[in-house]
Each structure stands twice: as structure tokens, then as C-alpha cells.
Amino acid sequence: MENVGIRLKKARETHGLSQRQLAKASGVSNAMICLIERGKSNPSLGLLKNVLDVIPITVSEFFSLELEDKPAKVFYKKDELTEIGSGLISYLQLGSNAQKINLQFMYECYQPGADTGRSMLHHETEEGGIVINGHIEVTVGDKTRILGPGDAYLFNSRTPHRFRNMGKEACTLVTACTPPSF
């Protein structure tokens, strides 16, 4: 979660918020906002999303903020993907220009026991993915399926959904979301 503090400070200042205003509106202590911005603490993805909802900016847009002027990049090595997850779920985002491109690609890895949470996700996009290896339980609305290698999903993300790895091995997916929302 490289440069989280620098990015948070830039996003906060761009939207004219003080640390204190951001802390109060997001329900996070002012000290925690300060620690994050100084690079002394890495927030969980859930805490970061709560803070970014106040700004308002999506996690994808947050990690796409240009910290310096660079020419557009076309090709990426695996170690150049941006990690926007934490814990048992890894979300490696392709590119750092989700604000300029209306498509978000990710390489996701769900460790055994990983779960996006009991509260189902929903956001203003469409998303799809293909399982590369392992198995993942996907719930969309009232439908649940266990998908394996080569299986895929595609749905309107406004429908509540959840992902869980109930297996004993990691599950890897390649996913896409348009427009970027995560």
C-alpha cells in the first residue's frame, strides 16, 4: 500500500478538507489520519474506503492519483501492479490511470477463508471475472455458485454480491469493472 499517506493528503487537500474535518466526517480519529498521512500507519482497506467516501473518491481513483507527471504507461510487469487490498484478499490493480481509463482490471487472490464480508457489496458498475485457479463461492442477489478454473461471472454490481473462498487453496481471478469503482 505504497504512498497511501501521500495520496491521502493529496486527495484531502484537493477537496479542501483539513485533517480534522476528514477525521470527524469519517469517524476516524484525527491522530489516525495524521499517522496515515505521515506514513506511520497503513489503514485496512475497509477503514480507507470509509475515509475516502467522505472526500468522495473511490479506492481505484485514490490509487490512480498521479503523484508526479509521467508519460502514459502501456506495459506493466507484475511487480508494477498496485496493491489495493489487505489481509486475506489481494487486489492488484493494473495501471495507475483509472481516472483516465473507464475500465479497471485486477488480478485478485483470495486466500483460504477469505470473505468480502457478511454485508454484501454493491456499487455503480458492471463487473466480470474469470477464475484462473482454485475455487470461489460467488453470491449475486439470491444466486450462489462455486466457480472453478475457467469458470466466469458477469453482472451488474448494483446487485448485492459477495465472494468467499471456502476451499483449502488460494483462488486467483482476473477481473474487470467498468467504470472503476473499487
Image (cartoon, grey):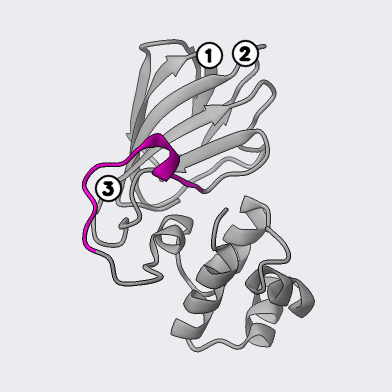
- Identify the mark at residue 7; answer none if there is no mark: none
Of residues 174 and 21, the one drawn nearer to the viewer in this rendering = 174
Q: Quadrant of residue 167?
A: top right
Q: Are marks 1 and 2 in contact (CB under 8 Å)?
A: yes
Would you call the spot at circle 1 few (<14 residues within 10 Å), some (14-19), or many (20 or more)? many
- Using the image, determine if residue 40 lies above or below residue 59: below
Residue stretch rendered in magenta on the structure: 71-83
Q: Which residue is mark 3?
A: 103
Residue 173, horizontal then vertical, whole percent? 43, 25
Q: Which residue is mark 2?
A: 169
Q: Is residue 61 left or right of residue 120?
A: left
Would you call the spot at circle 2 few (<14 residues within 10 Å), some (14-19), or many (20 or more)? some
Q: CA separation, marks 3 and 1?
A: 25 Å
Residue 63, horizontal then vertical, whole percent? 45, 58
Of residues 120 and 34, the one drawn nearer to the viewer in this rendering = 34
Residue 38, horizontal then vertical, whole percent? 67, 73
Amino acid identity at mark 3: Leu
Q: Residue at x 67, y 20 (%)?
A: 112
Of residues 74 and 92, the one drawn nearer to the viewer in this rendering = 74
Q: CA separation, marks 3 and 2?
A: 29 Å
Q: Is residue 141 visible?
A: no
Q: Residue at x 36, y 28 (%)?
A: 129
Question: Nearer the N terminus, badge 3 or badge 2?
Answer: 3
Q: Which element type, helix, strand or loop, lies under badge 1? A: loop
- Identify the mark at residue 135; answer none if there is no mark: 1
Q: Are marks 3 and 1 in contact (CB under 8 Å)?
A: no
Q: Is residue 126 left or right of residue 110?
A: left
Residue 106, horizontal then vertical, whole percent? 40, 38
- Using the image, determine if residue 94 lies above or below residue 110: below
Q: Residue at x 31, y 41 (%)?
A: 76
